[in-house]
Image: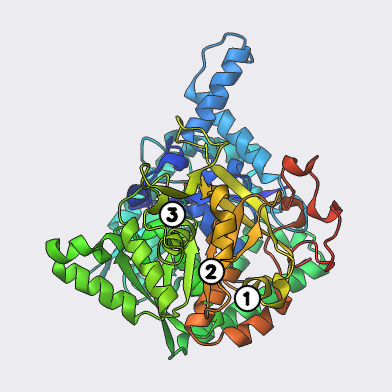
């Protein structure tokens, strides 16, 4: 029997995204659009789960009101309800419960087994109109699966008013929850400031929220978010859940247990080293959506994970790329000078993904600076395209070179619209999801990227784009020294470049940031941060042991190679390495 742990939120929350399709969300309004292996464009929270739990999720792991309604409407149209009145209770609430039960059985890691525990995060805040059907569904669900298999953790806020911890908001949100028929097993109090919940406050919450004192957890500020699991463990969370959900009766294989213990030891070591870091690495992120830092959540996580591995404290500078453009010298000289100061003093320059023309000339200037000054550079998706444009203009001398997306009238479209993409629909129509990149023969002797991926011939990363390097220009770009070292499975689409005579100048059409792990950083980011920290050689030799975070079953070639087949059934390339890490 699967155990279910529901996590609800009270008092404040992130933004409840409700029925919005994440694919058309504005990054400056909602934060990053996170992409899954199957091409699902989802809320950035799913990224946190994949990274922390080291699991691989699918679009069905993201349940929205819109998806449930669509399913209920389809059922109604099919006649499944025999013409009866369709209502929130029971039709929508049953739809939610069925969905959760179905998804909770799908394997999410390399064991390929049904998960023993399923964690459900209820978006938004208890009491929101949007979440009402979900709360009611959970109330029913505890009886459907048995209360012994159902635990509820309610996360609330404890406000610090001039040194006094205030519990009233927590009391009232728990009262709301109980009024809706749900009783928390744990009240996790996000306490403002570094002081833990004091004993009297804990007693008060216990008294007014109908829980024992050991059911109240203190989540105060700690050195980093990576310390939070340890903070929870120190307060007995693991033992509590073991008892509450009778986890002792779950059989876990010895190897899985050993893996878990090893992960815990390495995680502890990582948090300890983090506290003692005194050398730093200064990276500048040159992008368009710098006003909402959540827009680049996974990029920042990838840089953090890489910095830990390099034993450096990450100092991240944010530059709005339009501030680097000549017109800014006139209109906002202070911003212009600040932006250039940040760029020229950084040890590494990163241009992330993005859409639309604004600020792209500034990105091109940043890519040029890094190339000419031999500064480590990493271009992701749009950043990859930007570096190609920069090269075309300044090395090949095609002064008007640009992307079809950014300047439809350009004389040289070195970046073009991909033929298979819809021109009329923006939602869900990009080239999306996990796809292979195949490195060129010969790159194994010199490419840092190949070494970063453990020498693999084929690598797998997630994509999300509409434009690509113009096939008509590839030959000339390559002749001039731009090495496209990795292509798609047909060898037609340029996916990775790496300059040979530069400390680290790399671009990827994919978004490798979506597959980073705290203890297994995304290889291109790791190489970039290592080069910026002057430890690339050490890191390259350690990467011999790199293992991809993807379960084997995820690495399936697209239909274009014939029938879909797991990668290891395809003929092994000459060097014998089929899939990175395997
Ligand atoms: N706008 C570019 C494209 O669609 C890049 C997309 C991205 O950076 N995610 O190809």
Disc 2 crowd rating (10 Å Cα; few below 14, some 14-19, many 20+) is: many
Q: Nearer the viewer, residue 568 or 312?
A: 568
Q: Residue at x 50, y 51 (%)?
A: 34
Q: Position of residue 92 (x, y in %)?
A: 52, 27
Q: Are discs 2 and 1 less than 8 Å apart at CB?
A: yes
Visible residue check, residue 222 = no
x and y percentages locating residue 104 in the rendered image: 66, 45
Rounded to the nearest angstrom, the CA distance separating label 1 from label 3 is 58 Å
**Would you name the residue on which mark 1 appears?**
448
Q: Which mark is residue 506?
A: 2
- Relative depth, front residue between 443 and 1: 443
Q: Residues within 10 Å of mark 3 (few under 14, many from 20)?
A: some
**What residue is shown at x 47% (from left), y 40% (from top)?**
181
Q: Position of residue 275 (x, y in %)?
A: 46, 86
Q: Are marks 2 and 3 in contact (CB under 8 Å)?
A: no
Asked which secondary structure carries label 2, the reply is strand
Residue where numbered disc 3 is placed: 210
Tell which circle, 2 or 3, labels the residue nearer the N-terminal end: 3
Q: Residue at x 43, y 53 (%)?
A: 32
In the picture, measured across the screen, residue 388 lies left or right of residue 192, that is right
- Up/down of 97 relative to 115, above or below: above
For residue 41, above or below residue 226? above
In the displayed structure image, the side of residue 28 where residue 50 appears, left or right: right
Q: Earlier in the sequence, mark 2 or mark 1?
A: 1
Q: State which mark lies toward you, 2 or 3.
A: 2
Q: Give the mark toward the camera: 1 or 3.
A: 1
Residue 486: x and y in percent read 65, 61
């Amino acid at each position: 029997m699967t155990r279910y742990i529901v996590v609800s939120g009270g008092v404040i929350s992130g933004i409840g995204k409700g029925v919005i399709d994440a694919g058309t969300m504005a990054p400056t309004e909602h934060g990053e659009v996170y992409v899954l292996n199957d091409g699902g464009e989802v809320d950035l929270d799913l990224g946190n789960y994949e990274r922390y739990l080291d699991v691989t999720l699918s679009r069905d792991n993201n349940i929205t009101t819109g998806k449930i309604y669509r399913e209920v409407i389809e059922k109604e149209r099919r006649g499944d309800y025999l013409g009866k009145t369709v209502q929130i209770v029971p039709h929508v609430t049953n739809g939610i419960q069925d969905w959760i039960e179905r998804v909770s059985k799908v394997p999410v890691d390399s064991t390929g087994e049904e998960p023993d525990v399923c964690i459900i995060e209820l978006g938004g805040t208890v009491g929101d109109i949007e979440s009402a059907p979900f709360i009611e569904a959970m109330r029913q669900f505890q009886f459907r699966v048995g209360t012994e298999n159902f635990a509820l953790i309610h996360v609330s806020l404890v406000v610090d008013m001039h040194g006094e911890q205030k519990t009233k908001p927590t009391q009232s949100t728990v009262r709301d929850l109980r009024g809706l028929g749900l009783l928390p097993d744990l009240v996790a109090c996000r306490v403002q400031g570094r002081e833990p919940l004091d004993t009297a406050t804990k007693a008060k919450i216990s008294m007014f929220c109908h829980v024992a004192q050991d059911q109240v957890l203190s989540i105060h500020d700690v050195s980093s978010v990576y310390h939070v699991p340890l903070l929870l463990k120190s307060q007995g969370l693991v033992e509590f859940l073991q008892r509450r959900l009778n986890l002792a009766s779950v059989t876990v294989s010895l190897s899985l247990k050993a893996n878990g213990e090893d992960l815990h030891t390495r995680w502890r070591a990582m948090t300890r080293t983090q506290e003692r870091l005194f050398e730093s690495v200064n990276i500048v992120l040159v992008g368009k959506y710098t006003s909402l830092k959540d827009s680049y959540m996974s990029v920042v996580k990838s840089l953090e994970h890489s910095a830990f591995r390099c034993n450096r404290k990450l100092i991240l500078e944010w530059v709005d790329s339009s501030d680097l453009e000549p017109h800014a010298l006139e209109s906002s000289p202070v911003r212009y000078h600040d932006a250039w100061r940040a760029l020229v003093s950084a040890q590494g320059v990163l241009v992330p993904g993005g859409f639309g023309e604004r600020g792209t000339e500034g990105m091109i200037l940043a890519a040029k600076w890094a190339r000419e000054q031999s500064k480590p550079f990493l271009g992701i998706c749009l950043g990859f395209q930007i570096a190609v444009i920069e090269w075309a203009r300044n090395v090949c001398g095609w002064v008007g070179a640009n992307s079809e997306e950014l300047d439809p009238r350009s004389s040289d479209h070195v970046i073009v619209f991909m033929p298979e993409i819809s021109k009329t629909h923006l939602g869900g129509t990009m080239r999306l999801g996990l796809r292979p990149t195949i490195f060129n023969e010969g790159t194994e002797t010199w490419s840092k990227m190949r070494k970063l991926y453990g020498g693999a011939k084929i690598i797998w990363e997630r994509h999300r784009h509409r434009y690509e390097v113009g096939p008509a220009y590839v030959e000339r770009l390559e002749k001039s020294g731009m090495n496209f070292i990795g292509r798609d499975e047909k060898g037609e689409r340029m996916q990775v470049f790496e300059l040979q005579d530069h400390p680290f100048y790399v671009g990827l059409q994919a978004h490798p940031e979506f597959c980073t792990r705290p203890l297994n950083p995304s290889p291109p980011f790791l190489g970039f941060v290592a080069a910026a920290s002057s430890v690339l050689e050490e890191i390259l030799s350690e990467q011999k042991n790199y293992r991809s975070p993807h379960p084997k079953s995820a690495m399936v070639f697209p239909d274009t190679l014939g029938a879909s087949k797991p990668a290891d059934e395809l003929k092994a390339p000459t060097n014998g390495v089929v899939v990175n890490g395997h």
